[in-house]
Amino acid sequence: MNVINQTIEELKSQINIEKLPKHIAIIMDGNGRWAKKRFLPRNFGHQEGMERVIEIVSAASNLGIKYLSLYAFSTENWKRPMEEVQGLMKILVQYIAKELDKLHKNNVKVQIMGDINKLPEFARKEVIKTIEKTSLNTGMILNIALNYGGRDEIIFGIKNLLNDVEMGKIDINDLNADKFSDYLYTKGQPDPDLLIRPSGELRISNFMLYQIAYTEFWLSDVLWPDFTEKHLLLSIIDYQKRNRRFGGI
Ligand code: FPP
């Protein structure tokens, strides 16, 4: 049987709820190609991609995933045509307008990875409103990577660390890999257990470079606008079959 022909309930029955990945990271890719295949402008792909964000956030939260990190806009994405960048910002604001109440009701806490100071005012305002409104929620943490780059994040961490050293808050000799994690956008969160990249690309594209040291990858040819809850469940089933050794034997 083609596994994707299974129902959501059948797929769920194969998941061990006790051993869910705590943190899932997703590089949402393939929106442009999805639109091109349909002779549509690229922003139609992003629009459909937003619908998948809604579906996957809700599925992950209902399943009991504690942390979900979504790569929405990279530091390199500013190089895209102005029309596409504007379109993406509008889709982000549209997402917030449509989903903020539901996210809040579902106890989801929204956090941003990246420097939002560079976002256009209309988008930054909505993002700040979302962070504030959901700040006391205790359910799933949804990290949205916006104007995010993994190398930038490490430099951001080093600057914060140097500041703390200067203020005498940390002795540099006490620094270790775990303590450095607290200088990143994902402060206090476990590293991703599972990283999903749809669309057939086999690269990391500057996403969570520090945090993915021992992350399991799940790659698929399906384009993000076609990525459904079933794909998420499949990735978790596959993840649960892996033998994670973290460098041991
Ligand atoms: C990569 O596809 C996708 C992006 C750069 C944007 C991801 C954004 C969304 C899914 C929209 C909404 C997001 C949120 C958080 C509400 P691509 O354009 O690089 O596709 P291609 O490789 O086929 O050209």
Image (spheres, grey):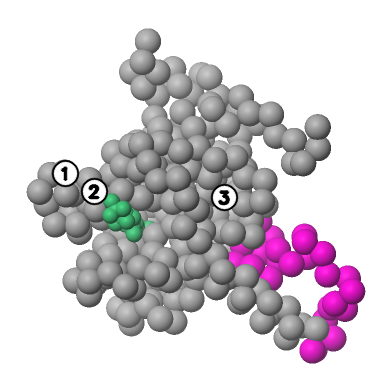
Disc 2 element: helix
Work out how far the residue at label 1 is from the one at label 2, CA to CA, in angstroms. 6 Å
Q: Secondary structure at mark 1?
A: helix
Q: For residue 52, say whether it is visible.
A: no
Q: Nearer the viewer, residue 38 or 114?
A: 38
Amino acid of disc 1: Lys
Q: Secondary structure at mark 3?
A: strand
Apparent side of residue 192 relative to residue 95 in the rendered image (left or right):
right
Q: Nearer the viewer, mark 1 or mark 3?
A: 1
Label ID, residue 197: none
Q: Which residue occupies 68% across, 77% down? A: 158
Q: Tags 1 and 2 in contact by the CB under 8 Å rule?
A: yes
Question: The magenta stretch spans which residues?
Answer: 166-189
Residue annotated with mark 1: 37
Q: Is residue 222 visible?
A: yes
* Residue furthest out toward the top: 1
| Residue at the image position 53 percent from the left and 26 percent from the top | 237
Three-letter amino acid code at the position of disc 2? Arg
Q: Residue furthest left?
A: 39
Question: Percent position (x, y) of residue 85?
Answer: 27, 70
- The residue furthest front is 202
Between circles 3 and 2, the one closer to the viewer is 2
Locate residue 16: give its quadrant.
top right
CA gap, disc 1 and disc 3: 33 Å
N-term mark: 3 or 2: 2
Q: Which residue is mark 3?
A: 67
How far apart are the alpha carbons under marks 3 and 2? 28 Å
Q: Position of residue 218 (x, y in %)?
A: 50, 37
Mark 2 and ligand 1: say if the CB distance to the nearest ligand atom is below 8 Å.
yes
Which label number is shown at residue 33? 2
**Residue drawn where x is 55% and y is 54% of the image:** 141
